[in-house]
Structures are given as C-alpha cells and as structure tokens.
Image (spheres, helix red, strand yellow):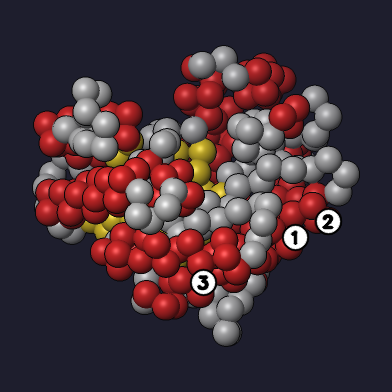
Amino acid sequence: MSKILFSFLIFLSFCAGNKDSLNRRTAHLLQTQKNIQNSNFELLMFSDSNTPKLNEFLKNSKIRKVGFVGDGQFLDPKTKFAFSPAMLDQELKRAYPNINETGIAYIDLESPYLEYLMNSETTSLEFKKSKKLFLDVLTYVKKARPNVKWGFYSIPFTTYWGKTTSFYDKDERVSEIIKNSDVLFPSIYIFYNNVNFILENEDYIKENTQQIIRIGEKYNKKVYPLVMSRYHPSSGNIAYETINETDFRFYLSTIKNTKYKEKSVDGIMYWNADAYFYKTNENKVVAEVQKSRMPFNTFYDNYLINTLSIFLEIK
C-alpha cells in the first residue's frame, strides 16, 4: 500500500512511547476537548460502530452521533419515485425506537433521484417526481420523529469539476427541499491525490465550503459538511485508502477555517462505515486490520478514536 496508515502508526506510537509522552498527549487532548466544548463549532459522527469504548470517548469529547434512514430500506421496490410508509416506519424504529427521541439525522436518498434533481430539466417528469419524493419522505420522517433534526445527504450540491456559478445555481432548483430541511449535509469527500494533495484539493475544498456556507446563510440553516478519512470509493487505485495524517489535517482545517462573508461552517460530520467495508472484504480495509494484528473491533475503536482525536486538535 502506497500510503502510510496513520491510524496504525499512531497506535504504535502509543504502545512504544514512554509514559511521559503518553501523559502529555492525553493532557493535550483534554485541553483541545475543552476548546471544542467552549466553541460553537460542532463535531458530528456517523459510524457503524456502537462499542462502550467509542461511546465513552464521544461522550467525553462532546461529539454528537448522527442517525440515518437509508433509501435501500424504504423505497418502494415495485414503484419508481415512491417510498413505502411501512418500510420507512421500520427504518425509523431502527434509527430512533422512541418516537420522542431527540437527535440529528440524515436521509440517504440517492441514485437516480439525486441525479435527477441535480441534472434534469426542472420541467421534466424526472425532476418533478424526484422533488416530490424528497419532500414526501422529509415530511413523513419529520412527522414521525418530530424531535429529530433532519437533512438530506449531499444537499446542497458540491462538485470537484466545473466549479462554476451555473453549477452552484443548481441549488436554487432544490430550494424548497432546503427550506424544509432542519440542517444541511453536503459532502466534501476526497477523490484525488495523483501528484500533490494540496495542489489537487485546496481549491475544491475551499470553493465548495464557501458555497455551502452561502446556502446555509441564505436559508438560515446549519451546515455540516460530510468528510471521510478514506479516499472516496470512486477514486481508482487509492479508493478506500486512509488519507495520511498531514493531508487529513489540511483537509479538516481548510473546511473549518474557510469563510464566506465572515461566516464559517457550523461543524463537520465524520462519516465512516469500516465495519461494512470489512464485512464485504474491501481489500484496503482488510489489509489495515491484518497489518494491525488486532481483532477487528479493537482495530476499529482505535482507528475511530485516533481519527476523531485529530478533529479535536484542529484549531
């Protein structure tokens, strides 16, 4: 594997370092946790892990867990542009068993409907039916779990290529969806590192961050861009590979420090599903676990906590 696995090296440094070094790092993390707690910037996380160790870390660090409902579990398999209320009820019971629960959650409603919203003519049936589907699902979940704040994955839109005014104006076509959402969950994932991470990604990160802040300000919505510590699954030979620590810090700090008219994003949401990737034998994840010589659950806890610790250290 061409990239250094920062999570593995951090774990080794914990094991090999002396007691004083470990104590200094622990004290530093406690201080950065306090800094995060005393700011308006929020750290959110979605992960397919729910261990006591991770949950304790999240609680102590004031990192909020995010729930979700997935389209594969609620779209009507027999009818296009439709969802099954019975199936969506089951998804809601999984995500929030108690109808009075509070929380924050994203609706994962993607292909082909998200693409229709982004690229189809607004006069087309594909666009109109997709828009209705999004609004119907949103109305349903807000009524069923009224104390949860809901938003859609990947709205407002972001792009790597063609960062133009005409692209960003596409958010106007989904203005009704944005207005009815409680929060916004655009994605700023990393796709490229062919020559130099900063050269290939800095403009992409900054320009998209400025635009999602603009949309959040326009509609008075909190904005939490989604990030991953791995390269996006569509990233060719680096897909699923862990982004090295130096580049990951640049990635996070650029999002956090980018402003539009003196306003920043309200927080960052870290998304990770390594348990699923490991279960489905994704080669890069399996190789990392094997190299660590740890049981998967131990590896996964360490990976998530080490990664989240970097979030906490970002000034």
Say which mark, if any, is on residue 199.
Answer: 2
What residue would you read off at disc 3? 213
What residue is at 29 percent from the left and 50 percent from the top? 128
The earlier-in-sequence mark between 3 and 2 is 2
* Residue nearest the observer in this picture, 115 or 67: 115
What residue is at 76 percent from the left and 51 percent from the top? 247
What residue is at 54 percent from the left and 80 percent from the top? 263
| Residue type, label 2 | Leu
User: Disc 1 vs disc 2: Cβ atoms closer than 8 Å?
Assistant: yes
The image position of residue 141, as x and y in percent, is 19, 49
The image position of residue 315, as x and y in percent, is 65, 69
What residue would you read off at disc 1? 202
Q: How far apart are marks 1 and 2 (CA)?
A: 6 Å
Q: What element carries label 3?
A: helix
**On screen, residue 16 above or below 139:** above
Q: How far apart are marks 3 and 2 (CA)?
A: 23 Å
- How crowded pointer 3 is (Cα within 10 Å; few <14, some 14-19, many 20+) is rated as many
* Residue nearest the observer in this picture, 102 or 210: 210
State the count of labels.
3
Q: Residue lying furthest front in this view? A: 123
| Residue type, label 1 | Glu
